[in-house]
Image: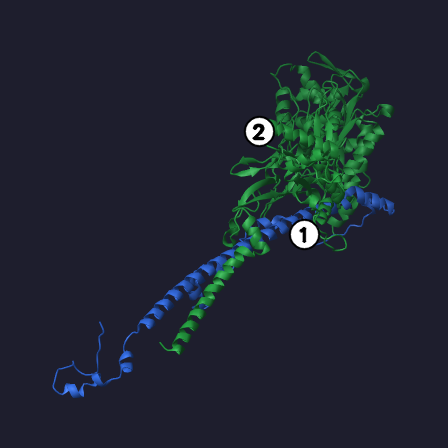
Chain colours: A blue, B green
């Protein structure tokens, strides 16, 4: 049912209305300006539908994209851990090789070749020093840093909620 | 609807479709054209099964020099092994057929430079494959490569493991196109190596060879190399210490190789089990330089005296720290094949021809002979049974408990005070001293000296000697007399050194130990605090006896004396049970400098040649002290007595 309405009262309310009813004088175009045309409604529904699909697809795409990125980052971290382990193995081996090349036996033979002789206590000069120098700290194991007890430093963005981020943004760290 | 409106609608539709199309395009790209990383992600199982391996904790000397570390070796696997085994029957690539296992093995050998007995390996793997098919109806899917085969004494065929070095593994990587060659060029991957992979495994390494082998011990991996599910993870082996520090501290040193599940989600990566069992490093009290000097002195002594075995122990009597510990023959920790033969040399005795000993200082009790007289005299002086000036008339023999005690070479020394008894090491005198003290107090003092009890040193295995007490089977009054001069009682060099260290340390006996610091995985350092083991005698007795022993050495003109330093000490010569041969154990214990002893050395030389009186401690063992002590004083920076006196008075 088409419902038409005008600026004045209801049609046929007075005798003057027949001649002075503005609605009857309005052009069809002007009447249409106040109606929802079918194509307009359809277009709007289509737009809403497409926007919903778009939003859904965008979210889905974003989820897949970030998920894939996260997994890639995980694999990359694993690859780095493997590389780190390989380097640690090399460090351990090289530390051992280095000791072998500076072994007591080798050093003694080399000193002998160079003409050194073992020194006796009577050949040494002794001085009285006020304070004994501190002992040289033992070099830490190449693998010791793996057990430092500190957590891997992840960016806060990985953990904080949007609210936390907003609060942090509004109240910067260190501020009151 | 006018045309312009339709155009606008179409434009809006297309505009909205573009992002939708882009989303589809992106999804398609993920599926159809994945990147290398995404391909890996697609192929990787989730969660990932990951090998993690913890290296065994390091062992360092007191100055941080590495004594035991780790190195890596690489094991080679051939996946899809059954296919290559199957192709063996067609002659392999040489006949134009598909590559066989022989071709693959030849390619591995060429690329890595490793020696592989190809026919033997193929034959053994075929045999294993046949057995698997017969028993489990499954082919050999993945082969762990071996280098060849050998046969044991019973003719049983044994596999020789194939372990590549890092260089050999790198050569394989170059041939597989994973790493550049020496010119920086990458080569195309050989199709023969398509199913090859290698895995790194940690191995214990002793870069100093035999140095301090008695202290360090040896660590080996126990297990078949096959994973076993334990405590929720798959373990591949357990590390076991055979003796020494490696054995005593195995629990905190040991590493592991395990299979664990890993997540690839970044926010969960911190939860990954990176190292299942973090090991600790050990810093020993051993000084590498003193250890090397000690071993050199011992080897010289053994060679000169033509002895079969021997040991030297160097400890700080103030702290109980063991600065060096050596026995002969030493084992080369890089060559475990000779271990059993060397242990047999160290353990073979007339009473135990098949004996095996891993450590002469800690695990091989012996009858010490006259070095034990220090303890008898200490007990008698402390109890007031005798004084330094107490006289004894030696007639060459004394009857106690029905047994006649004689001196060495059945000599008679006449009238002697207690210092003279120690100087001439008169058995009859010390037997008489023990009777003056009485059996009860004598054994109480021996208990205080912890004779017959373990010292509690942090080395394994520690074996105590035997001390028979009144009431024990076979104990008689004559046992007291023989015990007084170190016969009929057994103790290890360590037990004797610790007991006698009380004389050097003002009467206080410190717990012997070889570990100075434990460096925990998180970097915290736990320093071992010296702990007194007891005070068997008073400080006054210790001072008196030290002076008596120093004087006796000086009166004797002992070859143990050190130019510039005043020292105290006592020789020992003990017959080896069952006392039928002429073989002896020559020993010497000494310490110095006398006013502040920082070093106590216990020397034991087994079965020295009797030429030139070499069977006696004064001839064989005492000169070793005379040569070794000044070297140790120099390494420790202990000035001669005169210089020390000048420095102390600020001169």
Provide residue B88's location: percent of width, then percent of height. Answer: 70, 34
CA gap, disc 1 and disc 2: 65 Å
Q: Is residue B202 above or below residue B342?
A: below
Q: Which residue is mark 1?
A: A134
Residues indicated by labels 1 and 2 sit on the same polypeptide chain: no
Q: Is residue A173 above or below residue A149?
A: below
At a point 65% along the width and 37% down the height, the residue shown is B83
Camera-side residue: B321 or B382? B321
Q: Secondary structure at mark 2?
A: helix
Q: Nearer the viewer, mark 1 or mark 2?
A: 2
The answer to whether any part of residue B33 appears in the image is: yes
- How busy is the neighbourhood of tag 2: few (under 14 within 10 Å), some, or many (20 plus)? few
Camera-side residue: B95 or B334? B95
Q: Secondary structure at mark 1?
A: loop
Count of residue discs:
2
Q: Specify the label residue B217 is tagged with.
A: none
Chain to which mark 1 belongs? A
Query: Residue A28 vs residue A11: left or right?
Result: right
**Could you tell me if the residues under marks 1 and 2 are in contact, i.e. CB atoms within 8 Å?**
no
Provide residue B491's location: percent of width, then percent of height. Answer: 68, 26
Query: Residue A17 vs residue B636: left or right?
Result: left
Provide residue B541's location: percent of width, then percent of height. Answer: 67, 32
> From the image, which quarter does the N terminus of chain B lie in?
bottom left
Tell me where residue B106 sits by quadrant.
Answer: top right
The answer to whether any part of residue B461 appears in the image is: no
Chain to which mark 2 belongs? B
Camera-side residue: B623 or A52? A52
Q: Which residue is mark 2?
A: B136
Tell me where residue B500 sits by quadrant.
Answer: top right
Q: Is residue A36 above or below residue B421?
A: below
Camera-side residue: B201 or A98? B201
Tell me where residue B605 sits by quadrant.
Answer: top right
């Amino acid at each position: 049912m088409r419902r038409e309405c005008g600026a004045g009262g209801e049609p046929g309310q007075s005798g003057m209305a027949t001649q002075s009813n503005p609605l009857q004088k309005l052009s069809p175009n002007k009447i249409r300006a106040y109606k929802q045309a079918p194509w307009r409604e359809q277009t709007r529904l289509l737009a809403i539908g497409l926007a919903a699909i778009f939003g859904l697809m965008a979210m889905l795409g974003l989820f897949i994209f970030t998920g894939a990125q996260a997994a890639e980052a995980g694999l990359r971290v694993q690859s780095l851990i493997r590389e780190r382990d390989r380097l640690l193995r090399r460090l351990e081996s090289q530390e051992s090789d280095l000791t072998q090349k500076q072994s007591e036996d080798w050093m003694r033979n080399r000193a002998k070749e160079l003409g050194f002789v073992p020194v006796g206590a009577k050949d040494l000069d002794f001085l009285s020093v006020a304070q004994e120098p501190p002992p040289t700290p033992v070099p830490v194991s190449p693998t010791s840093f793996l057990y430092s007890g500190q957590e891997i430093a992840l960016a806060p963005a990985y953990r904080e909620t949007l609210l936390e981020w907003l609060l942090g943004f509004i109240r910067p760290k260190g501020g009151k | 609807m006018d045309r312009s409106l339709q155009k606008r609608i179409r434009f809006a539709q297309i505009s909205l479709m573009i992002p939708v199309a882009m989303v589809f395009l992106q999804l398609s790209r993920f599926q159809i054209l994945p990147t290398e990383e995404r391909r890996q992600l697609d192929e990787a199982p989730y969660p990932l099964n990951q090998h993690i391996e913890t290296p065994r904790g390091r062992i360092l000397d007191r100055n941080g020099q590495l004594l035991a570390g780790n190195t890596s070796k690489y094991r080679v696997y051939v996946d899809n092994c059954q296919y290559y085994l199957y192709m063996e029957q067609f002659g392999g690539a040489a006949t134009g057929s598909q590559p066989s296992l022989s071709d693959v093995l030849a390619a591995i050998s060429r690329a890595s430079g490793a020696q592989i007995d190809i026919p033997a390996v193929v034959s053994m793997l075929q045999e294993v494959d046949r057995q698997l098919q017969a028993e489990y109806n499954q082919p050999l899917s993945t082969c762990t490569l071996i280098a060849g085969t050998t046969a044991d004494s019973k003719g049983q065929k044994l596999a020789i493991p194939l372990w590549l070095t890092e260089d050999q593994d790198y050569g394989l990587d170059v041939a597989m196109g994973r790493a550049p060659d020496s010119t920086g060029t990458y080569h195309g991957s050989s199709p023969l190596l398509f199913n090859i992979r290698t895995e790194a495994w940690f191995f214990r390494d002793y870069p100093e060879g035999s140095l301090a082998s008695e202290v360090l011990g040896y660590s080996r991996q126990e297990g078949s190399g096959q994973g076993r599910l334990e405590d929720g993870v798959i373990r591949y082996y357990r590390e076991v210490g055979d003796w020494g520090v490696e054995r005593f501290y195995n629990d905190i040193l040991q590493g592991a190789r395990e299979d664990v599940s890993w997540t690839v989600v970044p926010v969960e990566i911190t939860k990954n089990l990176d190292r299942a069992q973090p090991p600790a490093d050990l810093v020993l009290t051993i000084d590498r330089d003193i250890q090397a000097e000690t071993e050199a002195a011992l080897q010289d002594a053994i060679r000169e005296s033509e002895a079969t075995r021997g040991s030297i122990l160097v400890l700080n009597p103030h702290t109980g720290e063991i600065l060096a510990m050596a026995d002969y023959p030493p084992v080369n920790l890089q060559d475990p094949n000779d271990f059993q033969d060397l242990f047999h040399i160290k353990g073979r005795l007339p009473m135990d021809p098949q004996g095996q000993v891993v450590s002469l200082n800690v695990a091989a009790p012996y009858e010490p002979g006259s070095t034990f007289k220090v303890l008898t005299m200490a007990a008698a002086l402390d109890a007031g049974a005798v004084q330094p000036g107490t006289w004894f008339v030696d007639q060459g023999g004394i009857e106690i408990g029905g047994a006649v005690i004689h001196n060495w070479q059945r000599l008679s020394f006449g009238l002697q005070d207690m210092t003279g008894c120690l100087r001439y090491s008169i058995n009859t005198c010390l037997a008489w001293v023990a009777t003056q003290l009485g059996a009860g107090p004598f054994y109480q003092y021996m208990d205080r000296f912890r004779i017959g009890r373990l010292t509690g040193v942090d080395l394994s295995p520690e074996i105590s000697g035997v001390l028979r007490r009144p009431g024990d089977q076979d104990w008689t009054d004559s046992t007291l007399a023989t015990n007084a001069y170190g016969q009929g009682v057994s103790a290890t060099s360590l037990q004797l050194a610790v007991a006698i260290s009380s004389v050097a340390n003002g009467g206080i006996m410190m717990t012997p130990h070889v570990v100075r610091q434990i460096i925990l995985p998180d970097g915290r350092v736990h320093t071992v605090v010296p702990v007194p083991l007891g005070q068997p005698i008073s400080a006054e007795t210790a001072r008196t006896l030290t002076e008596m022993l120093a004087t006796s050495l000086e009166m004797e003109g002992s070859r143990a004396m050190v130019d510039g330093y005043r020292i105290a000490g006592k020789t020992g010569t003990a017959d080896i049970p069952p006392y039928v041969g002429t073989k002896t154990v020559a020993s010497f214990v000494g310490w110095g400098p006398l006013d502040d002893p920082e070093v106590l050395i216990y020397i034991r030389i087994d079965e020295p040649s009797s030429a030139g009186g070499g069977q006696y401690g004064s001839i064989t063992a005492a000169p070793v002290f005379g040569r070794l002590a000044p070297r140790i004083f120099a390494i420790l920076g202990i000035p001669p007595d005169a210089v020390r006196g000048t420095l102390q008075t600020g001169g």
